[in-house]
Amino acid sequence: MPEFSYTARDASGKQITGSLNAGSERDAVNMLSVQNLFPVTLSSDEKKEPAFKLGSGRVKPAVIAVFYDQLSSLMANGVPLLRSLNILRDQASNPNLKGALTDIIARVEDGDTLADGFARHPKVFSEIAVNMSRAGGEGGFLEDVLKRVAVFTEQQDEMKSRTVGALIYPAVLASIGTIVVTVLMVFFVPKFGTLFDSLKANGELPWATEWLLSFSNGLQKYGILIVLFLAALYAVMR
């Protein structure tokens, strides 16, 4: 049980300092209130690394969907929320989910709602999960909401997988086509430079071919810069 150091004032306004053992910060405040003390500062003397760094690490939608479904089933069968979270935290194999649940359990113990805990980990729990769990908690139908969120997450992941699968073939063709055209522009078109120059001198070179030659010369001169620019643009967009 952690030890808390406190600075408090009594009913007469006298400042009192000390320490006490309590299960959580909220319990420590309650213990001080019983003694008619009003806490000014309260801090834990435990020096340990936080179990989870907020905002770090994502969890696959399939794993999160299973978590929502299991949490819903446990609560529907009469297991209290805090006990359910502890069970799922102990069973979690994903380190990001395990760390997030550790933080959420601590927050729920201090009186926060499940939705508040979810909201602290936007990379793990989606915004719709936060909003729906908040509505379910306030309306008294949290189990049903979690079940619906589980189904929605599974459907969303399946749709995303199908979309990505459908785009793979066109993306491969586009990539191969881009490589082929680039190789032609950089290595093969310049070999016909003499022929194109003579046609241009006679005014027999079409404007489309002139544009093609200009494009080829640009790739040869600035190809590396273009590649670096595209790589930087991709990194910024990511």
Image (cartoon, rainbow, N blue to C red):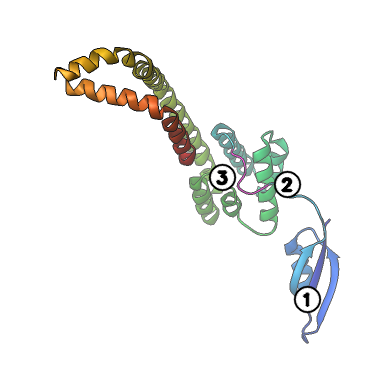
Q: Looking at the image, is mark 3 or mark 1 nearer the viewer?
A: 1
Image quadrant assignment for residue 78: top right
Residue 143 got which mark?
A: 3
Residue drawn at the location 76% of the way across and 49% of the way down = 49
Real-space Cα separation, disc 2 to disc 1, in angstroms: 29 Å
Residue drawn at the location 64% of the way across and 40% of the way down = 74
Q: Which residue is mark 2?
A: 51
Image quadrant assignment for residue 109: bottom right
Q: Which residue is mark 1?
A: 8
Q: Are marks 2 and 3 in contact (CB under 8 Å)?
A: no
> Circle 3: is it few (<14), some (14-19), or many (20+) Cα within 10 Å?
many
User: Which residue is the extreme one toward the bottom?
Assistant: 12
Q: Is residue 88 left or right of residue 119?
A: right
**Local SS, label 1:** strand
Q: Are marks 3 and 1 in contact (CB under 8 Å)?
A: no
**Local SS, label 2:** loop
Q: Is residue 18 left or right of residue 179?
A: right
- Disc 2 or 1, which lies upstream in sequence? 1
Q: Magenta span: helix, strand or loop, mainly? A: loop
Spot occupied by residue 187 in the image (x, y as percentages of width and height): 38, 15
- Disc 2 or 3, which lies upstream in sequence? 2
> Circle 1: is it few (<14), some (14-19), or many (20+) Cα within 10 Å?
many
Spot occupied by residue 87 in the image (x, y as percentages of width and height): 71, 40
